Image: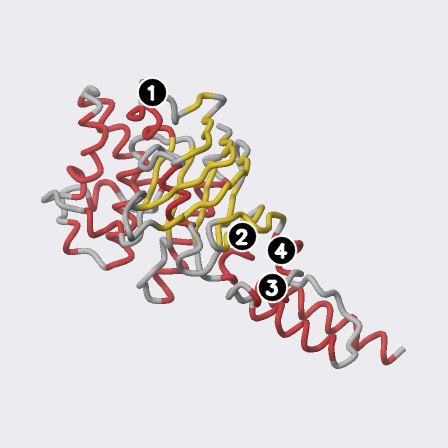
Amino acid sequence: MSIKVDNISYVYMQGTPFEYKALDDVSLEINNGEFIGLIGHTGSGKSTLVQHLNGLLKPTSGKIYIDDMDITQKGVNLKAIRQKVGLVFQYPEHQLFEETIYKDVAFGPTNLELSKEDIDKRVRMALSMVGIDYGESKDKSPFDLSGGQRRRVAIAGVLAMEPEVLILDEPTAGLDPNGRDSILQEIKLLHEKYGKTVILVSHSMEDIAKLVDRIIVMNKGKCVLSGSPREVFKQSDMLNEIGLGIPQITALVKQLRSKGMDIRDDCLTVQEAKEEILKYLRSRKS
């Protein structure tokens, strides 16, 4: 499923003294099967943008195409669009409300008026996709789970709608390191094993560097940079200027290079930096 954003702008509280332009002439494309990282400082327009991609917000101007269908036109079936483009908000566990995990995950499919067999199949699959055992968990209250597990259940509720695109807005916010790593591993699996198009909104440059195929950088409501993690994080001066950092390893490598160490400037992981440093030290000995 492809997504095309064509020159969209969005103004909150238009025509009032509190008018604020959150998106300013944004254009971008997301191709089927991509893993996109969306980054930007607070207030850059990230969350506003992703809420446009499944029709929760309608642009003040511009067009949005989902598989060549203009979802901004009158009469479009937004319910069908939201089944294809699933959005997981920050702290999605706050939206859990049913007495059992099964009922919570089944809520969306039930509203689609599917058969009991199809609902059960979707719940089983969705829980499996986020690493939760169906038999052990289906009758438990979601409120008896840890924060990380509750978040998995909330994500499963979106996956049970069988979206082709999964958008996650800061999915690891507030989790401890183990819960954070576990959620990120499941998101990576959703992309690699199940072929989901994933859009990950995050403030963690390390997570983005390790996971995504392409990064889109937002600043003051505009898309200011797009490229692979290596391409984007090489623009460290620009990123720092707009209030963003770079992965710690990339920053370390940059400092080593400034001290005269002839190593690659696009290392993203500890392993890559280690190999470059060892290569440099060996060359100095020979």
Q: CA distance from mark 1 to mark 2?
A: 30 Å
Residue 197, placed above or below residue 183: above
Instruction: Kindly identify which residue carries mark 4.
Output: 232
Residue at (29, 33) in percent of width and height? 160
Local SS, label 1: loop
Residue at (18, 34) in percent of width and height? 107
Relative to 241, is 164 on the left or the right?
Answer: left
Instruction: Kindly identify which residue carries mark 3.
Output: 269
Local SS, label 3: loop
* Residue nearer the viewer, 125 or 16: 16
Q: CA distance from mark 1 to mark 4?
A: 37 Å
Relative to 253, is 19 on the left or the right?
Answer: left
Local SS, label 2: strand
Instruction: Kindly identify which residue carries mark 1.
Output: 74
Local SS, label 4: helix
* Residue nearer the viewer, 137 or 239: 239
* Image coords of residue 47 (percent x, y): 38, 49
* Image coords of residue 141 (percent x, y): 13, 49
Of circles 3 and 4, the one toward us is: 4
